[in-house]
Image (spheres, helix red, strand yellow):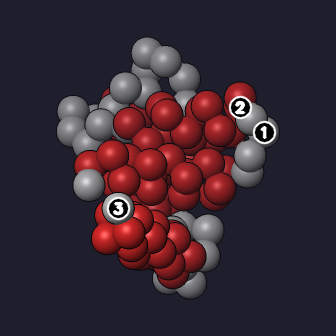
Amino acid sequence: MIRQLLIYLIISTIIILSFLLFSSIFYPLFNSDDGVTVLMLHYFKLPNDIYFWNQDRVGSIIPLIGQLFYKGLGFSLLWSESITHYIILILGY
């Protein structure tokens, strides 16, 4: 029981530190790949934006889910993108 709790604590610490060091809201080297996701989040409209501005690749799952935080809960664009991105990473783990 204590060993499982320790493992969960270590994993949670790694996730929190990773978020604080590498998420879009805190990372100092914000680049155009991150910026396009934030812009898509702001201008997102279905069904036109299933892909990044009607391209045939790179689906826009982060802007789609990020709408819950941006429009639903009133978070800023960067917070919405960061939280959504890390939720997807955690679920993938």
Q: Quadrant of the C terminus?
A: bottom left
Q: Are marks 2 and 1 in contact (CB under 8 Å)?
A: yes
The spot of residue 30 in percent (x, y) is 51, 75
Mark 2 Cα-neighbour bin, 10 Å: few <14, some 14–19, many ≥20: some
Q: Quadrant of residue 57?
A: top left
Give the farthest residue toward the top: 47
Residue visible at 62% across and 48% down in the picture: 80
Q: Is residue 11 visible?
A: no
Residue visible at 71% across and 29% down in the picture: 72
Give the farthest residue toward the left: 57
Q: Are marks 3 and 1 in contact (CB under 8 Å)?
A: no
Residue visible at 36% across and 53% down in the picture: 90
The spot of residue 42 in percent (x, y) is 63, 41
Q: Is residue 53 visible?
A: yes
Camera-nearest label, 3 or 1: 3
The spot of residue 60 in percent (x, y) is 37, 37
Secondary element at tag 2: helix
Location of mark 2 (residue): 71
Measure the alpha-carbon separation of dots 3 and 1: 39 Å
**Residue 49, relative to residue 93: is it above or below?**
above
What amino acid is labelled 3 in the image?
Met
Mark 1 Cα-neighbour bin, 10 Å: few <14, some 14–19, many ≥20: few
Q: Quadrant of residue 79?
A: bottom right
Task: Tell me if 43 is positioned left or right of 12 in this view.
Answer: right
Location of mark 3 (residue): 1
Location of mark 1 (residue): 74
What amino acid is labelled 2 in the image?
Lys
